[in-house]
Image: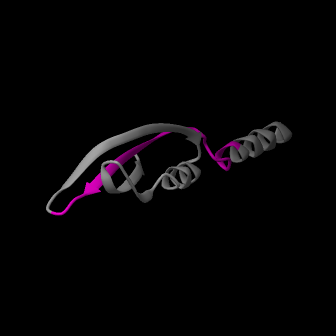
Amino acid sequence: MKKLMLMIVVIGLGSTMTSCKKDYVCKCTKTYTGNTNSVTTEDGLYTYKDTKAKAIERCDRNNAESADLGGEYTRNCVIQ
């Protein structure tokens, strides 16, 4: 009986110490800055099945500052 209880406790502790992988949604927006005003548009949704810390890290890699035909922009991505 003691061995059974010990095994249940060990399994229980082991399962609580592992990281949970869940679906996290990363939402990106682009903000174009002009001479007098700025315009923000949605620029993509990405789903990551990972731990929260890794999903945030992956989402942050989508941040950028650049330019295209619309002008200079800042791309900002956050986990929802």
- Let me know if residue 80 appears in the view: no
**Quarter in which the C terminus is drawn:** top left
Which region of the structure is painted magenta? 15-35
Residue for point 70% across, 47% down: 13
**Quarter in which the N terminus is drawn:** top right
Residue for point 42% across, 37% down: 45
Pinpoint residue 5: horizontal percent, then vertical percent: 77, 40
Pinpoint residue 12: horizontal percent, then vertical percent: 69, 42
Residue for point 80% across, 40% down: 7
Residue extending farthest to the right is 3
Please give the count of numbered marks on the rendered protein: 0
Pinpoint residue 24: horizontal percent, then vertical percent: 49, 40
39 to the left or right of 20: left
In the image, residue 72 lies in the stretch drawn in magenta: no
- Let me know if residue 26 appears in the view: yes
Pinpoint residue 38: horizontal percent, then vertical percent: 20, 56
User: Could you say which is closer to the camera, residue 52 or residue 71?
Assistant: 71
Quarter assignment of residue 27? top left
Quarter assignment of residue 2? top right
Residue extending farthest to the left is 36
In the image, residue 31 lies in the stretch drawn in magenta: yes
User: Could you say which is closer to the camera, residue 44 or residue 2?
Assistant: 44
Residue extending farthest to the bottom is 35
Residue for point 82% across, 36% down: 4
15 to the left or right of 47: right
